[in-house]
Amino acid sequence: MTMTRHLRLIALLLPLWLMHGYAHAAAEDTGQVSSKELPVDITAINPEREVGYHVGDVLTRTLILKVADKYELLPTSIPIPGNQKRYRNKEQGIEIYASDLKHEHSGDQNIYTLRLSYQVFTSSIVAKPAALPPEFVKFTGEGQLYRVRLPSWNFRISPLAVYGSVRIEKDMSQFRGPLLLDDKRQQLTLRIALVVLGLSLLGLLYILGNRSWLPRMGGPFAKAMRIVRKTPQDAAGVQLAVSSLHQAFNQHAGHSVFTAEEVLAKLPQFGVMQAEIQQFFQLSRAVFFDAKAPSSLNEPAHVWLRKFSRRCRDVERGLK
Amino acid sequence: MSDRQLADWRKEALHLQSEVNQVVVGQADAVRLITTSIFARGHVLLEGDVGVGKTTLLRAFTRGIGGGYQRIEGTIDLMPNDLVYHTYLGDDGRPHVSPGPLLSHGTDLAVFFFNEINRARPQVHSLLLRVMAERTLSAFNREHTFPHMLVFADRNQVEKEETFEIPSAARDRFMMEIPILVPADLDIMESLIFDTRYHDVDALVNQVKPDILQFDQLNQVAAEIQSSIQASPTLRRYALDLWLATRSPADYGVKIEGVDSKRLVVAGASPRGIAMMMRAARVNAWLNDREAVVPEDIHAVFHETVAHRLVFSPIYEMRRTEIARELLSQIIHAISAP
């Protein structure tokens, strides 16, 4: 009986011992991969959206690996472009498109930035779940070889077109945004219409404002002043200047005015320049009707007229 | 005639004006216009209500001008020959013919005063057409001339019975039609009532110094005034615009309330009328001691020289005085110079 119990124990332990011995022998054969877990800080920066990818799209993710500086990443262990993961011996249609590794050393850490791009080579008539597959990279250090798994990332591949007839109320996928009509043309039309409307309103404002942009701007004396400023300094120029100022007085009074007294009675705001207005009418008489009429100007007529027109414009604008 | 002589004549003119203003009060504008007309050698028609001093005013001027003076009253039975001659039986029992008012002073006739001209028949108006325009008359187989004659006439617009409308051709011969209104000054009105000086018209008129002007030199002075007072191109253009505006006021934006401007004027001022206006404007400039006419000179005589020449559509004739004054004021306001 005791003998039987010993045989059973031996039969139980023998396979365990044999398995342990095989495993130990295998470790010693490859020599480097440690069963210990390497303390690597992995930060994954994945694509912003998880849906809406089609065949041909390229997805890029960045993995930042921080590890103690006594460990180093084996560059030969990073994924090879063109490689495609298989599941149950079936290609998944997600292929490594590019890989890029950068290395920095900061403090007592090695920082590896691994940028992996995958291209989608599969499609479906309905939305299909897919994943950027997990990848394995290797580190060495202290005579050991460590294998580190980079996590996978799930996303969905959309069909290129809706297959068959779709009842939209039964196809309210939360992963798909609302269907938008292309309104660029209408937006452009609206913008043009708004610009035209704005210009029209400005034009209307200009017309309603008596063809001036600001109140009291563009009055008869402002126009006369512009003419006076441009007139030549000869007799014809003086005549034109005086005539322009007469027209301004007439426009302000609402009818023709012929004397300073008429102007002052009709336009009391010009009372502050009574003496100048009398001088102006004297000058006008001398220029147009009676060359022998006395003139009280102390400077050339065209100079005086420029000052006078400016002063009239100021009074017209409410300045004293 | 020298400038100095013209200056002396101006003093005489202002003296005459002053003398008349002393006996006819409150009519300074009318006195000025009649003075202007005398030196422009134009006939004058006074228009106003009864008893406002029209006759007194003209008599006062007549005394100041000097020369021959004749007066005739317009009546419905007045005939043209009454102005030329009258017949009577003399003491010898034989018929006699003697010169009428127009001929009695010969060439020395200075003032022919036609009182209430609108009571005379159109035949008389026709005679006056020639006398006023040409200052000649054919009678007794020869031509009579009145080179120094001015016709002063008056009419009242109130009475319409037994009166005749003066035809436009006769009106056009008058240089001015001057309205005579009751003075607006209350002090003057009071003195006209209570100051006995104004009650005796003959005595009042006799207060005017006689023969202030030398009537037989007035034509020469007038010609000298017309040639010495200048009118610039700008002023000529202004006068032309005024004339055109009297012919078609609507084209110049003239609007009168309640009046269709396009249908108002049948005939505007005549060339003779505008020429008379300019003669009067030149005299006004001379009286104001200027050597050139300015727009204010035209304004001073515009209404009085133009209003009576306008011919309105019949529907507006009843409001003639009011519409003419408004029309001419609007024209002055509408046209600028320069």
Image (cartoon, coloured by chain):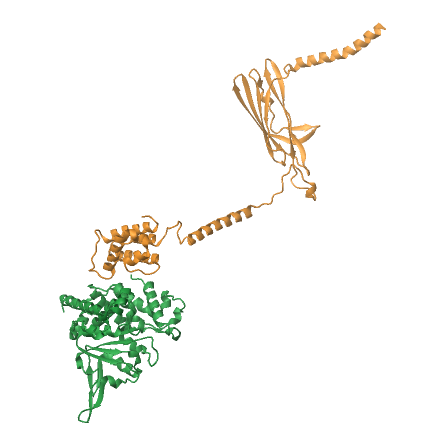
Q: Quadrant of residue A125?
A: top right
* Residue A277 image offset from top left, x and y in percent: 27, 54
- Residue B269 can be seen in this image: no
* Residue A222 image offset from top left, x and y in percent: 34, 52
- Foreground: A19 or B129? B129
| The N terminus of chain A, quarter of image | top right
Q: What residue occupies the far bottom of the structure in this picture? A: B93
Q: Quadrant of residue A99?
A: top right
Colour of chain B in the rendered structure image: green
- Foreground: B53 or B186? B186
* Residue B323 image offset from top left, x and y in percent: 36, 69
Count the marks: 0
* Residue B194 image offset from top left, x and y in percent: 25, 69
Left of A107 or right of it: where is B203?
left
Q: Quadrant of residue A18?
A: top right
- Residue A28 can be seen in this image: yes
Q: Measured along the vertical axis of the image, is residue B126 above or below residue A219?
A: below
Colour of chain A in the rendered structure image: orange
